[in-house]
């Protein structure tokens, strides 16, 4: 069962979480504001109520996780989101990352390959606040050619290589943030498609994500 109450206690814990994420080096105030206002415990089973505001990943079923808040903040900060930008997210999972992006004014297109996780978000009442998020069941490696091009692409699963089709769906001047690596640990990279089509790649810290898998799981 999902919790439905957002108490003063939860709000207080969120402020502390923001302090923690800030102390780890996140400076984008819009990212921090989004973390402060989104009730992360809504995205978890009520069994996690006591720990929902610890800076950790938690299970969301089907062997998947809601990312650690610091990781969400880190990727989002690298994306440099501006209001009304079109953002493609691969790996909807709990929808927490998608709501952070939407809270910052992005138009979010998010894809999940696991039917059960996709269906589980259909009756999640809190998402009614975010009409700017569009949900898709499919294989993230294919992207969404119908809705391309995107200003930004965020991949929230460990990608063994840069998905070529997603680079194609990026606008000139657009950016992709991707945890790259086939092993236990991935390097966060930011790939910018310059106006002339040339790709510029920057390397950031190491993280550990669940793997980005091929195809859909029904
Ligand atoms: N952004 C999520 C993190 C979820 S974990 C959140 O905020 O909670 C990564 C998710 O990526 C999992 O749900 C997994 O099923 C999904 N995933 C893995 N490979 C994928 C693919 N090829 N296409 C779409 N989703 C994928």
Image (cartoon, helix red, strand yellow):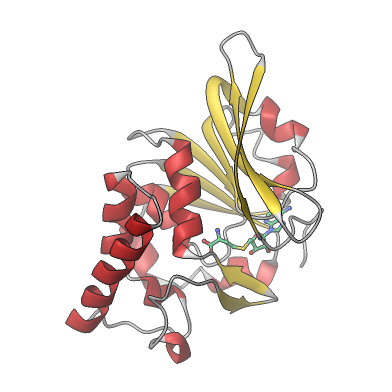
Residue at the image position 64 percent from the left and 39 percent from the top:
144
Figure quadrant of residue 59: bottom right
Residue at the image position 66 percent from the left and 60 percent from the top:
209
From where the camera sits, is residue 185 visible? yes
Residue toward you, 36 or 39: 36
Figure quadrant of residue 91: bottom right
Relative to 133, say whether 123 is above or below.
Answer: below
In the drawing, does residue 140 fall left or right of residue 97?
A: right
Residue toward you, 43 or 182: 182
Q: Residue furthest left?
A: 8
Point out residue 148 in the picture as x, y percentages from the top left corner. 59, 30
Q: Residue furthest top?
A: 196
Q: Quadrant of the C terminus?
A: bottom right
From where the camera sits, is residue 1 visible? no
Figure quadrant of residue 65: bottom right
Point out residue 143 in the picture as x, y percentages from the top left corner. 68, 40
In the drawing, does residue 171 fall left or right of residue 108?
A: right
Relative to 20, say whether 140 is above or below.
Answer: above
Residue at the image position 21 percent from the left and 76 percent from the top:
12
Ligand 1's image quarter is bottom right
Residue at the image position 50 percent from the left and 65 percent from the top:
68
Q: Residue furthest bottom?
A: 47
Q: How many numbered callouts?
A: 0
Point out residue 125 in the picture as x, y percentages from the top left corner. 37, 71
Point out residue 115 in the picture as x, y percentages from the top left corner. 68, 67
In the drawing, does residue 103 fall left or right of residue 157?
A: left
């Amino acid at each position: 069962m999902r919790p439905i109450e957002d108490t003063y206690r939860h709000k207080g814990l969120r402020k502390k979480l923001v302090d923690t994420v800030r102390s780890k080096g996140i400076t984008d105030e819009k990212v921090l504001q989004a973390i402060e206002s989104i009730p992360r415990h809504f995205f978890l089973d009520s069994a996690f109520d006591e720990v929902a505001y610890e800076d950790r990943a938690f299970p969301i079923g089907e062997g998947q996780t809601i990312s650690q808040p610091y990781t969400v903040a880190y990727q989002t900060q690298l994306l440099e989101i501006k209001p009304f930008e079109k953002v493609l997210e691969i790996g909807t999972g709990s929808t927490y990352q998608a709501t952070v992006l939407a809270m910052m004014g992005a138009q979010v297109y998010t894809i999940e390959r696991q039917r059960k996780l996709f269906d589980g978000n259909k009756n999640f009442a809190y998402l009614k606040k975010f009409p700017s998020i569009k949900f898709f069941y499919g294989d993230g490696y294919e992207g969404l050619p119908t809705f391309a091009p995107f200003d930004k692409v965020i991949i929230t699963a460990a990608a063994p290589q840069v998905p070529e089709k997603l680079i194609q769906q990026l606008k000139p001047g657009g950016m992709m943030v991707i945890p790259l690596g086939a092993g236990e640990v991935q390097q966060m990279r930011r790939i910018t498609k310059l106006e002339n089509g040339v790709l510029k790649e920057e390397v950031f810290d190491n993280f550990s994500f669940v793997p980005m898998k091929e195809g859909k799981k029904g």
